[in-house]
Image (cartoon, rainbow, N blue to C red):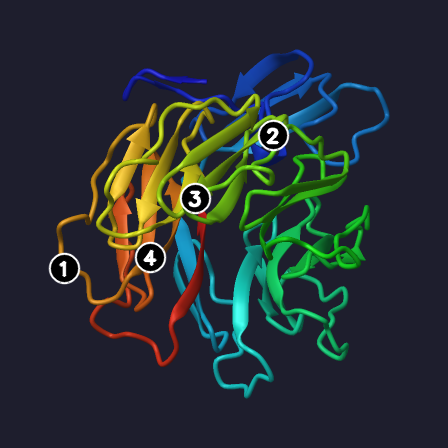
Amino acid sequence: MRDRRIGTTTRLSLGPGRAEADRPSTLPSISGNGRFVAFQSAADNLVPGDTNSAPDIFVHDRTPVRGYWLVASDGGIFAYGSAGFAGSTGSIKLAKPIVGLAATPSGKGYWLVASDGGIFAFGDAAFLGSTGKIKLAQPIVGMAATPTGNGYWLVARDGGIFAFGDALFSGSTGAIRLAQPIVGMAATPAGGGYWLVGSDGGIFAFGDAAFFGSTGAMRLNRPIVGLSQSPSGAGYWLVASDGGIFAFGDAEFEGSMGGQHLNAPVVSLVPDGDGSGYWLVASDGGIFAFDAPFKGSMGGVHLARPVTGMVRYGDGYLMVGEDGGIFDFSTKPFLGSLGGHPPARPIVSVAALG
């Protein structure tokens, strides 16, 4: 869709993970006020479970959605903009700290996961099971929801996988002695599989997640801190704490900070909107852009607490500090921050709408 007022073109026929339609989309129609766009598509990857081999009608609501949640290690939730507050565990005594948050596809709910695998569901996020009552060999380090929002996986430090709802168990490394611990997980766009990544860059692919390569047999200067999949799911990037980038499959290598002096370690890689480039963010808020627009940085500015995460937001990105400070480098309105009023426990995760 072309917006002639501001000169931008937006692709509306996108599936989970911003995957492009695998078949033609036709017969577009727009409402009089420009809010709704309807089209027909023969693609079977725009929504999960489309297996009837028949064209479908889709309606896209162009109402701007913007907002974000911050979650602290005690499960305290801080909601801004369209990201509504649906509940928290901030006033509950938890057995173990919260380590992550996953939002539902509708954006009207979320799950919190603790390091013992306890799950806390709010809004339209259904409780589908947990490992909170199970003695785990290693703590939970991450969570991923299925594209339908009707299931989720938990991953432990040893690569143990716990699947609930419509999340398929396709395998794990829980019974394997790993050279280094698992530090991340990503589900495929279709939700039929997942990748696990160790801090040595070892990749373990299960289900419909294809193995495209790893750094498990290489001697790295610094550990891997994250994995990001390409929009198609046919590739992935690994990022090390020194800014080294390792690209596999159709994930293009656009540059790296490996071998260069950094003032602070890199904590995350975020692909840009079209998946052709990426940003790296360091714990001092320094941003390194590779074939992605540089919108600004906090590098060189004294921060009260280190940056712990970043997400793509609008036409740019949004960083969060351990104290809940928000640094918004996009054209979206600034919605608020905890900077100057830090929570009782550190912020461990951020999730955004829009």
Amino acid type of disc 1? His
Provide residue 180's location: percent of width, then percent of height.
Answer: 59, 54
Q: Which of the two residues, 221 or 16, is positioned nearer the viewer here?
A: 221
Q: Secondary structure at mark 4?
A: strand
What residue sits right under mark 2 in the picture? Answer: 59
Disc on the earlier residue, 2 or 1: 2
What residue sits right under mark 3 in the picture? Answer: 240
Provide residue 348's location: percent of width, then percent of height.
Answer: 44, 65
Task: Evaluate whether residue 317 shows in this view.
Answer: yes
Eye-nearest disc, 3 or 1: 3
Amino acid type of disc 4? Val
Give the alpha-carbon distance from disc 2 to disc 1, as whole Å. Answer: 46 Å
Q: Is residue 12 left or right of residue 156?
A: left
Give the alpha-carbon distance from disc 4 to disc 3, as whole Å. Answer: 20 Å
What residue sits right under mark 1 in the picture? Answer: 302
Provide residue 42's location: percent of width, then percent of height.
Answer: 73, 16
